Image (cartoon, helix red, strand yellow):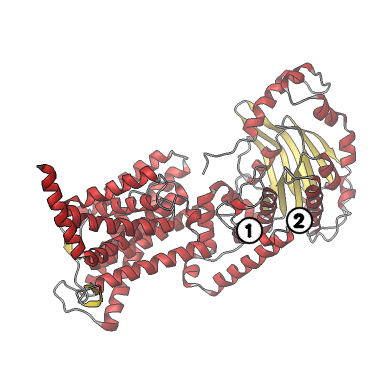
Amino acid sequence: MIATVVLASLSEGARLLRDNFWDYTVTGATIGAIYSLVALGYTLVYGVLRLINFAHSEIFMIGTFGALYATQWLGFDPGDPKKTGIALIGVLLFCLVIAMAVSGASAVVLERIAYRPLRRRGSTRLAALISAIGASFAISEAFALWRGRNFEQFPRLFDKTHTVFTLFGYDVRADQVLIILSALFMMVALDQFVRRTRLGRGVRAVAQNSETAQLMGVNIDRVIVLTFLLGGLMAGGAALLDMVFLEQTRYNIGFILGVKAFTAAVLGGIGNLRGALLGGFVLGLVENYGSALFGTQWKDVISFTLLVAVLMFRPTGLLGESLGKARA
Amino acid sequence: MAEATILSDSPSVASAGPESGPESGSGSQRLLELRHLTMRFGGVHALNKVDLHIDRGEILGLIGPNGAGKTTVFNVITGVYDPSGGDVLFEGRSIVKRKRYQRTKLGIARTFQNVRLFSEMSALENVMVGVDAQHHSSVGGAILRLGRQRREEREAHERGMELLEFMGIARRAHQTARNLPYGDQRRLEIARAMATRPKLLLLDEPAAGFNPAEKADLMSLIGRIRDDGYTVLLIEHDMSLVMGISDRVAVLDFGEKIADGSPASVQADQRVIEAYLGVPSDDEDLLASTGPGAPGDAEHAEHAEHAEPVGRAEPAGEG
């Protein structure tokens, strides 16, 4: 009896997925791109410190408020006419810079306050983890007190339902193109930075062997600040893209997204930059296909089932751990 | 202390000051000085009031039986351990409060007894990390790809290749360090250490596992490194290598310096001969042996047992 109901709903889901496959794919990739950007922050910090920065989700949340403030500062209201052309690019870039700056700065401050004092005293990693969870709650609740617990609307900056191109009969929207391309651009930039610059080499050296790196003249404190900064910048970028896509924020918006991004990082192989990228997209896609098959209410179940399934067969994630392996 | 006469032979040392007579020792000639250096692990003295100095342009061999405290000396100089007592002076200034990376910038670099490369990076990148120590490009500069960032990157690349060539492993430049043959990994470590432009190069058993031909190559290489103006402190077990190349040799035994002088005088030194021949590594023999001038042999046996693992311990949980 139950089996037939399940089968019936499954076959209906399969039809839904088949008929709207590209719709689900593009939406999944869009969400996945945002997961990937946030996942990079988890993976960078883990690679260098072997610490899971649970407050990273709040760095993302702060970025969304940064973007919101930027629009308010420019005088946007949710009902305003849409921007086009150069004006639109200017507005988006301004919001991006503000969101990245706010998130990057808060990530650096977070490291100073929540982690560095513990590290100086040689505390255990468990203590740092508790500090991370504490910082996460503290920041989130501080925003709840300041901004209230209701959603705040992010103004629609442009006519995002405008079709840019058609993919196998599905109209790909402007915001989806914007989000996926911007996210890919930021990821490539980060990857090149870590692979090809002196500071990036320092980050990889510390990730591979922090003891030896220090003896070769790498200033570990600067490397740690740098990894928090880079993670924060990526989260800030993700925050603006998320605002463009979902158009609302509040104090706890980082929570589920943070858990998902962390899942993406582990899925791809935590500590591995390209793993975070892959994990984010895989998670976004599977989640969307799954919600078509089983219904939207199963979305989170599907994400975490996928994580468990992958870890059973590849305990170090799809691409394996180690920031060092982030090279070609 | 006849080392000064040997020193005067060393050519082309940029910083070599006026001829220093025997016993002069002070002033700018002295690069590194350990004063009453003591390192205790629990109750065990890994180093006990060791006095040691290295003059510019010198190759100082540091020898001694297993567990004598040689690697501990390196670890204290480079800041892996904080000494329990005594002082380390580099160019006349105490460095015991300096952080590790700062000591590298001052001009101290080392290799490791058990190779410790950045195993997932290419050989060239490993060396470039060393070159980076002397560079200053900022985050903003790197993101905006400013002129200095590009210039430093090019310079790091060129200097890295030069050093790989000098060590004879240029053809390995783009291979992952982990995949290099063992001997080349050791050579790469030396190249990486030299990349930081050290005034003092600490080599910890660079010839370990080498065959005689490779050892001979390495000896001439270390000689060339010295001739280029580097000062070298060398830990080595191979007596013919260390005696053949060092200007001066210091001997540690159970954390104490028991001899210091020219290779010939050290080889003739009675306490050194006893340390090596009279006190076998096996503790039963050790207890049976009676070395004059070495009080408390039974106690020493314990030191040997405990100092070895502690002195050589990988500080794995640090950082």
The x, y position of residue A38, in whole percent, is: 34, 58
Residue A53 lies left or right of residue A296; in this view the side is: right
Disc 1, disc 2: CB below 8 Å? no
The x, y position of residue B210, in whole percent, is: 75, 45
Q: Please tell me which residue lies in front, A285 or B247.
A: A285
Question: How busy is the neighbourhood of tag 1: few (under 14 within 10 Å), some, or many (20 plus)?
Answer: many
For label 2, the SS is loop
Rounded to the nearest whole Å, what is the CA distance between mark 1 and mark 2?
Answer: 17 Å
Determine the chain carrying the residue at label 2.
B
**In the image, which disc is placed on residue B230?**
2
Please name the residue shown 73% across and 36% down the image: B50
Residue B296 lies left or right of residue A102; in this view the side is: right
Determine the chain carrying the residue at label 1.
B
Name the amino acid type tagged 1: Val
Question: How busy is the neighbourhood of tag 2: few (under 14 within 10 Å), some, or many (20 plus)?
Answer: many
**In the image, which disc is placed on residue B127?**
1
Name the amino acid type tagged 2: Tyr
- Which quarter of the figure has residue A131? top left
Depth-wise, is mark 1 or mark 2 nearer the camera?
1
Residue under disc 1 on the same chain as residue under disc 2: yes
